[in-house]
Amino acid sequence: MQTPTFLYAAPASNLYSTTFSILSYAKWVHDTPKLCVIDNHAMAQQFKNAMHSHHNYSIHAISLKNIAQSDCQILIFSTLSAAQEQHTLNTQVQFPALSISLNNLDCETGSAFCIYKKNQNYAFKVNMESLTQSKVHIDPRVLLLAKTTEPNS
């Protein structure tokens, strides 16, 4: 079995700016993509507070059980395990939909982008298989923020 290759992004100082930076590289079908924070109302409110006028997203807090009916183009997971994320993506999500995890350090399964704290900053990993599954076009320049490294380096 081939060892997975991960892409690690350059650090940023804010979870929300990191997320919106990633999203700025996506091509959306709708002018105002629906961003759904799963099972974390407080975080959804923080995304609303952090959204600047140059970002155009409709931000919602939704329950995990309502994902199938939600029509979300962006899913933010912060409370599920990687296995739960993967199961949800495989069984409840209508694609295209881009998934971002705030609780999946390994990023081997589950979300397409996994944001994590590195020292005092935030960085992210990209799961290329999940990104392909998302069916959201991401400008490859987002990967210029990252460098290829081995998992434990």
Image (cartoon, grey):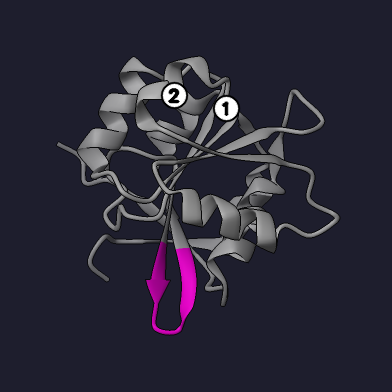
In-image side of 59 versus 93 (left or right):
right
Image quarter (top left, top right, bottom left or bottom right) of the N terminus: top left
Please state the horizontal and vertical placement of residue 13, each as a whole percent of the image.
56, 77
Front residue of 45 and 122: 45
Q: Residue 83, how many percent across, how many down? A: 21, 36
Is 40 a magenta residue? no
Magenta residues span: 116-123
Q: Disc 2 marks which amino acid?
A: Ile
Residue 90 image offset from top left, x and y in percent: 33, 20
User: Mark 2 or 1 closer to N-term?
Assistant: 2
Give me the residue at 32% from left, 55% from top. Answer: 103
Q: Are marks 2 and 1 in contact (CB under 8 Å)?
A: yes
* Relative horizontal placement of residue 140, taking residue 99 as reference (left or right): right
User: Which residue is painted at 29% across and 61% down in the image?
Assistant: 150
Which residue bears the numbered disc 1? 72
Task: Judge by depth and name the residue closer to the eye, 98 or 133.
Answer: 98
Near mark 1 (Cα within 10 A), the count class, few <14, some 14-19 or many ≥20, is many
Q: Secondary structure at mark 1?
A: loop
Q: CA distance from mark 2 to mark 1?
A: 8 Å
Name the residue located 52 percent from the left edge and 73 percent from the top edge: 11
* Residue 65 located left or right of residue 53: left
- Circle 2 packing at 10 Å, graded few (<14), some (14-19), many (20+), is some
The residue type indicated by label 1 comes to Cys
The residue sitting at the left extreme is 1
Q: Which residue is mark 2?
A: 67
Residue 92 image-quadrant placement: top left
